[in-house]
């Protein structure tokens, strides 16, 4: 971090500022020019409150050289994080060379529905089953999910098909229902629910953290840092499209964030082409693109009867289309030397 001081600073005040900074464990180097003094701070500057520094009467400018996130930062953890799960007698991995496919309905609707889809996606090669029990809907009049009963059905589907399950947690009070859930999803709308993130930091369950629809890459990484700061390193990031100005697709799939994230963080990065596009016929193309962009996997909505789905039918692949897509993805994965 670099701090440019105002000209003519009082030396006594400067000593106090430097002592305060050193108390935080950073080393402070001076560079005194004819007109200006510049302080160079080295060490762990994540603990420094730059807003307070900017408000200090001695300070002209503060430039952060290092990113404000540490645990998620590849600079401090060069090796990829790889998460391992038990999946139908095999080990499913997310990160580093694997292309992991998570598939299932937007929402759990009934036992028959979720078990049927679970078997179909498993047979087609998915490594995880997704399915929402608590649904964050834009309208209070839309289907809100089955709640705890939906989690029970996801667990039944897990028993039937052997796939680990991913489902969304909307608030801390629901956490006790997630004891047997393999990966907890934090949805786009909750990416900056800091109390929820802190609570998940105390948990040891893997967290699938979706990018907020108007969140920057740094905000996504800082949200991951919240979970990691609590001691939970098992975070998977998910690009699910951001708000744009054109309505030809539900969101804009920001695929460029994939290589950008892979450069900045060691955490696995997956893509959700279903919520990004909102249209099932775009999902195969965007899934191939996600693989080519270097994503560690995809999370895709699949429904046995999209026309009658209670949520997101238009973006849901049928089991047959999902199977076809998986066959194509396997060919693409082979070219990229990725394990699907
Ligand atoms: C979902 O995955 O079901 C979902 C609601 O996604 P998002 O939070 O990305 O909108
Ligand atoms: Mn959905």
Image (cartoon, rainbow, N blue to C red):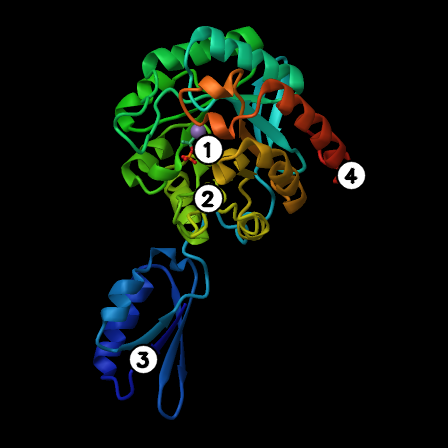
Report the mark closest to the observer, 1 or 2: 2
- Looking at the rendered image, the quarter that the C terminus falls into is top right
- Distance from Cα at disc 3 to Cα at disc 2: 44 Å
Check whether the beta carbons of the residues at disc 3 and disc 4 lie within 8 A of each other. Answer: no
Task: Read off the residue under disc 2.
Answer: 251
Residue 198, image x, y percentages? 32, 37
Precedes in sequence: disc 2 or disc 4: 2
Task: Read off the residue under disc 3.
Answer: 5
**Residue closest to the eye, 108 or 157:** 108
Precedes in sequence: disc 4 or disc 1: 1
Residue 154, image x, y percentages? 45, 13
**Residue closest to the eye, 281 or 72:** 281
Precedes in sequence: disc 3 or disc 4: 3
Precedes in sequence: disc 1 or disc 2: 1
- Distance from Cα at disc 1 to Cα at disc 2: 19 Å
Check whether the beta carbons of the residues at disc 1 and disc 3 lie within 8 A of each other. Answer: no
**Placement of 165 over or under 110, stated as above or below:** below
Can residue 165 be seen in this snapshot? Answer: no
Task: Read off the residue under disc 1.
Answer: 208
Report the mark closest to the observer, 4 or 1: 4
- Looking at the rendered image, the quarter that the N terminus falls into is bottom left
**Placement of 54 over or under 11, stated as above or below:** above
Is residue 264 shown left or right of residue 231? right
Which element is circle 1 on?
Answer: strand
Which element is circle 4 on?
Answer: helix
**Placement of 94 over or under 54, stated as above or below:** above
Residue at 38% over, 63% down: 26
- Distance from Cα at disc 1 to Cα at disc 3: 42 Å
- Distance from Cα at disc 4 to Cα at disc 1: 27 Å
Quadrant assignment for ligand 2: top left
Precedes in sequence: disc 1 or disc 3: 3
Task: Read off the residue under disc 4.
Answer: 335
């Amino acid at each position: 971090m670099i701090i440019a001081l105002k000209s003519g600073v009082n030396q006594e005040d400067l000593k106090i500022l430097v002592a305060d900074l050193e108390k935080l464990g950073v080393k402070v180097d001076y560079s005194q020019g004819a007109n200006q003094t510049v302080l160079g701070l080295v060490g762990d500057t994540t603990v420094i409150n730059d807003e307070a520094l900017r408000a200090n009467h001695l300070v002209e400018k503060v430039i952060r050289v290092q990113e404000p996130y540490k645990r998620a930062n590849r600079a401090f953890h060069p090796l990829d994080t790889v998460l391992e799960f038990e999946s139908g007698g095999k080990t499913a991995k997310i990160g580093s060379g694997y292309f992991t496919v998570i598939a299932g309905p937007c929402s759990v609707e009934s036992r028959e529905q979720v078990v049927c889809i679970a078997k179909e996606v498993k047979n087609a090669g998915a490594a995880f089953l997704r399915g929402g029990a608590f649904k964050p809907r834009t309208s209070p009049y839309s289907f809100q999910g089955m709640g705890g009963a939906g989690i029970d059905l996801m667990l039944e589907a897990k028993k039937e098909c052997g796939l680990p399950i991913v489902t969304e947690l909307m608030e801390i009070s629901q956490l006790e229902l997630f004891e047997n859930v393999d990966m907890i999803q934090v949805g786009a709308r909750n990416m900056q629910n800091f109390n929820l993130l802190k609570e998940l930091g105390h948990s040891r369950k893997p967290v699938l953290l979706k990018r907020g629809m108007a969140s920057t890459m740094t905000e996504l990484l800082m949200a991951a840092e919240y979970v990691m700061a609590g001691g939970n390193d098992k975070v998977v990031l998910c690009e699910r499209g951001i708000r744009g100005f054109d309505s030809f697709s539900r969101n804009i799939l920001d695929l460029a964030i994939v290589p950008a994230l892979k450069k900045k963080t060691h955490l696995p990065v997956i893509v959700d082409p279903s919520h990004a596009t909102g249209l099932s016929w775009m999902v195969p193309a965007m899934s191939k693109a996600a693989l080519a962009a270097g994503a560690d996997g995809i999370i895709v909505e699949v429904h046995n009867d999209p026309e009658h789905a209670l949520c997101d039918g238009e973006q849901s692949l049928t089991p047959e289309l999902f199977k076809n897509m998986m066959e194509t993805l396997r060919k693409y994965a082979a070219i990229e030397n990725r394990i699907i």
